[in-house]
Each structure stands twice: as C-alpha cells, then as structure tokens.
C-alpha cells in the first residue's frame, strides 16, 4: 500500500531520529534511557497523561499570523521556523498554517516539516491544541480544554477550534473538558502528579462559579492524576494569568526545576510563594519534591514588559531538549549546564527566540507533543 505524503515524511524523520537515539544507553526497560519512563498505568477505562519525556509520535506547532503579530511578523516567523527545523532533526513536526500562508511556511521550515492547512489565529499551540492522554494498549485521546483566548483577552475564533481540528484530522478520540483552560496551565510528572497555578484556572474569566475543588476533580479525572499541587500564581500580569510552564517543570518524578528570578524582579513574589509550597509538597507516590534552581538571565538588553526571559520554558523531545538562548553569555552557559545535568541522556540545543519572547511566550508554549501509543 502506498504511503501518504504525511506518512512518508514522518517515516523518513523517524528513521533519521532513530540513528541519533541508537547511540543512547538502554534503560532497564529496554528503552533508550534518554526517552523517559513509561507512564503510570491508567485506571480501568480511564486515561493517564504521560510526562513530556515519554516518547513522542510527533510535535505540533502553529504558524503565526500577521493579524496578531503585525510589524513583528517576520521576526516571530523566523523564530518558529528555527524551532521547527531543530525539532524535525529528532521527530516529525506538523505545523498548522492558514491556507494562504502554507507556501511561505514550507519555504521557511524546509522539507523536513509538514505544513497542514488548518486555520489559526496565533502560534501558542500548547494552549490551543489538544493535551494528549493514554489509556490501555494502543489507546490515545486528546483533551479539548475549550480554549477561550486566555479568558477573552485575544481573538480565538480559529484557535478555539484547533484542538478538535487536529483530533479529527488524526482520527483520535476527543475528550471535551468540563472546564476551560490551556495546556500550559498544567504540568504532569507521568506518575499521577500535576502542578497548576490557581491564578490561571481558578479564575472567573475561564471557570466562573467553579471552585478550586471543582477544577481539581476535573483535572484528576481528565489526566488520571491523584495529586494536584497548586501554587498561587498571579492574575492579570500576563495574558495567561501565570502559567505553570513558565515557572516550574517536572524533569522526572520527584524533581522540579524552577525559573529563579532576581530578588527585585517583578515575578519574585510569585516564585517565592511557589517555591515555599513545592519544597514542602508530597507527590502522588508520597515523596517530597527535590527543587532545582534555574536562574533567569539578567544582561539581555532592553526588552518589553511582556518578554518571557526564563529558561524553564524548554521543550523535551525524542533524544533532545530544546531551550532558549537570550544573549546573556554567562547565564546562557550556566542554564545549558544545568539542563544538561537534568537530562544527561539527551542532547540539549539552545535556540534564539527574541521575537517569540516579546510575545510573552517561549519554546514550550509554541509546541505540543503527541505521545506514542502505549
């Protein structure tokens, strides 16, 4: 049977990525140790959200539109194309783009990136796309978190349909969440623990009338979690109302890396509160968390108030980690060293994302993984 263009492209990328992964040491389960542990078993008939380090089938991205980015469109498209080309060295990339932008996106990203003609408003597919969960053998589904433009702050007539468009295209089961949220608002360790910020989810602009307990129950059911670790965050200081993926990430079960600002930085209070909570927290396995500091850069020149200057918004892919570079040579080098220590079996690649950062997001915000079926 002849393969479709999409299947052929993915097969070629996976073959190339396999050569890279072949050099990784094998773990006790026979998987390359750099690819992450298997997710905890799903409850009977239920779903379980794997950690980002679990093997990916592919990465989704989205092509920015002039309608949103205006005079910054050239720079941000260069950033997105650069990220897509790096990821495509390790795993397939499917980039969503409006039909009128498909040719430009293909030219910018190259033949190693598939461009799918699906209408979008903006590039933040971590928030607009589906968050995938696994069930029993061969079962996968995508959670549609009912994206509403971060509480009505931005146009989302197209982005509000991105999750269902992707799932229909892939013929993957769609789970419509009983709450409103975004993928960047939750962080999973793959073993039953989630982290989340109250400011984003327990917010009348997304979930009016719902308590933290209501939202927690929904997250546990959707993601197969037994423990949700809440930090306060802060409302209104950025478009997301403070997503967890710009603050704290699981590097493995029991280990959290935190974006650490200077003491006088605007986000210092948010960090202090989150650090206090997480350093005392117990995960789903009953273990206290180890906290690793990842200092933010300082000498990065003049940036806008919304600029996301944090290394923790990196993205874990098959055999690698893609993280930002901001131009503060010492801070960039220190951050690279820390992330290499956290992911010793993966190649760590730094990418300049200056325009992307001006939009208040980063590499993780602009990507969304589809995991391999269990």
Image (cartoon, grey):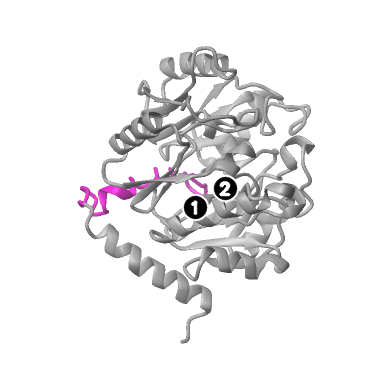
Residue neighbourhood size for the residue with mark 2, other residues' Cα within 10 Å, grouped as few (<14), some (14–19), many (≥20) = many
Residue furthest front in the image: 301
Q: Which residue is mark 1?
A: 83
**In-front residue for pair 203/61:** 61
Image location of residue 53, percent across then percent down: 39, 46
Q: Secondary structure at mark 1?
A: helix
Residue neighbourhood size for the residue with mark 1, other residues' Cα within 10 Å, grouped as few (<14), some (14–19), many (≥20) = many
Q: What residue is shown at x 74% (from left), y 32% (from top)?
A: 207
Spatial CA distance of label 2 from label 1 is 9 Å
Up/down of 18 relative to 201, above or below: below
Q: What residue is shown at x 68% (from left), y 64% (from top)?
A: 118
Magenta includes 44?
yes
Tell me the magenta residue range.
25-53
Image location of residue 78, percent across then percent down: 57, 54
Q: Which residue is mark 2?
A: 366
The C terminus sits in image quarter:
bottom left
Q: What residue is shown at x 59% (from left), y 35% (from top)?
A: 185
SS assignment for the magenta stretch, majority: loop
**In-front residue for pair 250/285:** 250
272 displayed left or right of 238: left
Magenta includes 330?
no
Q: Secondary structure at mark 2?
A: loop
Image location of residue 331, percent across then percent down: 40, 29
The quadrant where residue 74 appears: bottom right
């Amino acid at each position: 049977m002849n393969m479709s263009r999409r299947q052929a492209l993915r097969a070629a990328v996976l073959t190339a990525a396999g050569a890279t992964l072949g050099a990784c040491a094998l773990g006790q389960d026979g998987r390359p140790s750099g690819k992450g542990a298997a997710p905890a078993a799903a409850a009977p008939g239920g779903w379980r959200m794997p950690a980002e380090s679990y093997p990916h089938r592919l990465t989704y991205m989205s092509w920015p539109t002039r309608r949103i980015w205006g005079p910054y469109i050239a720079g941000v498209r260069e950033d997105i194309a650069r990220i897509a080309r790096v990821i495509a060295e390790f795993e397939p990339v499917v980039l969503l783009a409006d039909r009128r932008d498909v040719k430009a996106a293909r030219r910018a990203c190259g033949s190693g990136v598939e461009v799918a003609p699906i209408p979008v408003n903006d590039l933040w597919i971590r928030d607009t796309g589906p968050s995938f969960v696994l069930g029993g053998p061969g079962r996968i589904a995508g959670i549609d978190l009912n994206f509403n433009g971060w509480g009505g702050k931005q146009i989302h007539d197209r982005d509000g349909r991105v999750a269902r468009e992707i799932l229909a295209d892939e013929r993957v089961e769609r789970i419509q969440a009983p709450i409103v949220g975004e993928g960047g608002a939750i962080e999973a360790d793959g073993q039953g623990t989630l982290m989340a910020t109250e400011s984003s989810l327990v917010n009348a602009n997304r979930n009016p009338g719902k308590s933290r307990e209501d939202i927690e129950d929904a997250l546990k059911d959707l993601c197969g979690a037994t423990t949700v670790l809440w930090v306060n965050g802060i409302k209104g200081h950025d478009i997301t109302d403070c997503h967890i993926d710009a603050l704290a990430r699981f590097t493995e079960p029991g280990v959290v890396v935190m974006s650490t600002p200077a003491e006088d930085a605007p986000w210092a209070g948010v960090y202090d509160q989150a650090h206090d909570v997480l350093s005392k927290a117990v995960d789903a396995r009953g273990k206290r968390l180890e906290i690793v500091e990842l200092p933010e850069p300082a000498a990065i020149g003049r940036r806008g108030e919304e600029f996301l200057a944090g290394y923790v918004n990196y993205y874990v892919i098959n055999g690698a980690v893609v993280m930002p570079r901001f131009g503060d040579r010492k801070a960039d080098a220190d951050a690279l060293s820390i992330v290499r220590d956290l992911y010793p079996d993966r190649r760590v690649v730094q990418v300049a994302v200056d325009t992307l950062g001006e939009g208040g997001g980063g590499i993780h915000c602009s990507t969304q993984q589809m995991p391999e079926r269990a």
